[in-house]
Image: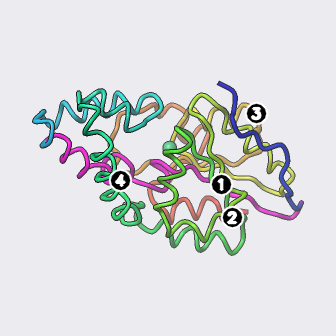
Amino acid sequence: MSDPNPVETMEVQPEEIVDVFDLDHTLLDTERRWFRPALEWLAAYTKLQNSVVDERFAECNRTTFTFEKLFVALDIAQRYSDRIEVQLRGTLSIRANGCLYPRVVEMLEDRSSVARLVLVTAGDEAWQRWKFEQLTRLHPYFRVGDRHFVPLDGSKADRVALYRGASRVSFVDDSPRWLDEVRGRFPMVRLVRPVWASDGVVEDHSGDGKHWDVACSAPEINAILSRP
Ligand SMILES: [Mg+2]
């Protein structure tokens, strides 16, 4: 699928420092914290085991997540799905800011005094936009034009390319897929992979410490980004 919203140009000053951040599992503890109560509610509602709901949710997440897909996976009758979605979104909205990883806002506050902060997140565009809208604590740090929403089968490197006129570009993302994509296109970009203890998922760590730096906390991300 081609990018539905290609951005052709971006005004970047040569003295600017640009920090590019991913959203899910980089700033937001998406599945394990933010979504947890919603999944428990869905398990109670569908009378399915928690583990079954978790599994089907994970399956939906492997491709582009939408509520529609999740409700189909959980055999929720279509006539109830709109009402359930409104209820779940309400709960998720209230919880959103509280599910940012510890000290992420302080890190962004710090970085914003020296760098231009850019968000590049992938997934269903409407869903990612909605998610970001709820995260009001992040809004002051990312100018509207520096918020990029790309399809899961699209390219983050294309968005990073818009800022290559800056004096330094860093790319912070938990996913080796995107780190590898940016590394392949822009060897000069500083790469940082946050690995949060609470994620606890078995993932590919082969590039850690070799192709990119690893940070286990917001102050560690900050420290790597602050290196000259
Ligand atoms: Mg991510």
Please give the name of the residue rendered at 29% of the width and 32% of the height, measured from the top-left corner: 78
Judge from the rendering whether residue 90 lies leftward or rightward of residue 65; answer left or right.
left
Which residue does the numbered mark 4 point to in the structure image?
89
Q: Earlier in the sequence, mark 3 or mark 1?
A: 1
Q: Amino acid at mark 4?
A: Arg
Mark 1: give few (<14), some (14-19) or many (20+) Cα within 10 Å. some
Q: Secondary structure at mark 4?
A: helix
Residue indicated by mark 3: 185
Q: Is residue 104 left or right of residue 155?
A: left
The structure's colour scheme is: rainbow
- Separation (CA) of disc 2 from disc 1: 7 Å
Picture residue at 45% right of the left edge, 59% below the top: 217
Residue at 63% over, 48% down = 120
Nearest to the eye among marks 4 and 2: give it: 4
Q: Work out which quarter of the rendered image holds the N terminus and state it.
A: top right
Where disc 1 sits, the SS reads strand
Magenta region: 14-43
Q: Earlier in the sequence, mark 3 or mark 2?
A: 2
Residue visible at 36% across and 33% down in the picture:
202
Queried on whether the Cβ of the residue with tag 4 lies below 8 angstroms from ligand 1, the answer reads no
State the CA–CA distance, disc 3 to disc 2. 25 Å
Q: Quadrant of residue 72?
A: top left
